[in-house]
Image (cartoon, grey):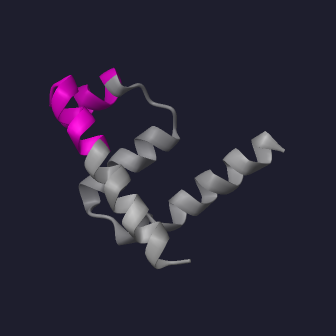
Amino acid sequence: AELGGVTALRLRLRTLLPRLSAEQSRLLTLLLQDVTQQQIAGRFGMGRRALERQIELLFGEIAVLLSSTK
């Protein structure tokens, strides 16, 4: 059941991609592909703390989108 829940969550998150900014969409795609934070930081050309901040902002935006689409 857990695997099905994870798959459903990933699919739900993918439906949000068009509603995110280009950078947030790219970040979410990489996170969903299980790319490491170190690799993502390199691709985005930013340090670990800056990436963590971007992830926090992304999660905040996801929370807003999910709460508005119940």
Q: Quadrant of residue 39?
A: top left
Number of numbered discs on residues: 0
In percent of the image, x 22 and y 24: which residue is there?
Answer: 48
Q: 23 or 12: which is nearer to us?
A: 12
Quadrant location of the N terminus? top right
Residue 65 location (% of width, % of height) = 41, 70
Residue 49 shown left or right of residue 38 in the figure: left
In percent of the image, x 44 and y 48: which residue is there?
Answer: 29
Residue 2 location (% of width, % of height) = 78, 41
Residue 20 shown left or right of residue 69 in the figure: left
Q: 63 or 50: which is nearer to us?
A: 63
Our reading of the magenta stretch's main secondary structure is helix
Residue 48 among those drawn in magenta:
yes
Taking the view exactly as shown, the residue that stands out farthest to the top is 38
Residue 40 location (% of width, % of height) = 31, 31
Residue 27 among those drawn in magenta:
no
The residue segment tinted magenta is: 38-55
Taking the view exactly as shown, the residue that stands out farthest to the right is 1
In the displayed structure, would residue 28 be above or below residue 61? above
Residue 43 shown left or right of residue 34 in the figure: left
Quadrant location of the C terminus? bottom right
In the displayed structure, would residue 68 be above or below residue 22? below
